[in-house]
Image (cartoon, grey):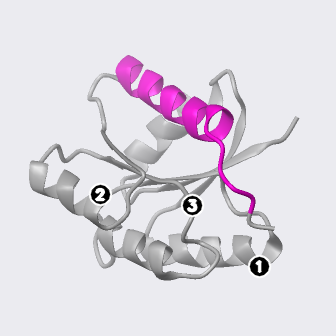
Amino acid sequence: MNTHRILLVDDNHHDIELALTALDDAPERAEVLVASSGVQALQLLREARAAGTLPDLVLLDLKMPQMDGLAVLDAIRAESGLQGLPVVMLTTSGEGRDIHECYAHGASGYVVKPLDFTQFREALRTIQAFWTTLNRRPRTH
């Protein structure tokens, strides 16, 4: 059985812990890498590309200091070997403008973080199951 990899990018340590807890007891196990900034996320992705261990999914927060999620998304979509990665925006913003911008910049999906932990856990499990198990992507090798 293949181990799936997920890169979680979020600057909020509380949200990171909640996401890790939600994904830890999911039916499909995944290796979750965490980046607490956009710069760190791009560094991890470049290292993973070089090692041939790119994640199956990037969960990306939109509202982050220094380099926000939209800038990270733009960098992923512009960089050779990273362009095809599924990137799901996982954010607290339900603003129509933010949703439109993310899709216009190449987001694969957009999910507003539920405030209730049970709903949050179910949302993450559904996202994980779809992108790591059900969805088929072309191989890059």
Image position of 17 (left or right of 70): right
Which callout, 3 or 1, points at the residue further toward the start of the chain? Answer: 1
Can residue 27 be seen from the camera position used here?
yes
Q: Secondary structure at mark 1?
A: helix
Residue tagged 1 = 50
Q: Give me the C-alpha separation between circle 3 and circle 1.
A: 15 Å
Query: Residue 49 is drawn in which quadrant?
Result: bottom right
Residue at 74% in and 66% down: 140
Mark 3 is surrounded, within 10 Å at the Cα level, by few (under 14), some (14 to 19) or many (20 or more) other residues, namely some
Q: Amino acid at mark 1?
A: Ala
Upstream in sequence: badge 2 or badge 3: 3
- Residue that lies at the very extreme toward the top in this rendered image: 118
Mark 2 is surrounded, within 10 Å at the Cα level, by few (under 14), some (14 to 19) or many (20 or more) other residues, namely: some
**Amino acid type of the residue that numbered disc 3 sits on in the rendered structure:** Leu
Tell me where residue 63 appears, x and y as whole percent.
26, 61
Image quadrant where one finds the C terminus: bottom right
User: Badges 3 and 1: C-beta atoms under 8 Å apart?
Assistant: no
Residue drawn at x 21%, y 62% is 101
Mark 2 highlights which residue?
103
Expressed as whole percent of the image width and height from the top left, the position of residue 114 reads 29, 30
The residue pinned by badge 3 equals 85
Give the secondary structure at mark 2. Answer: helix
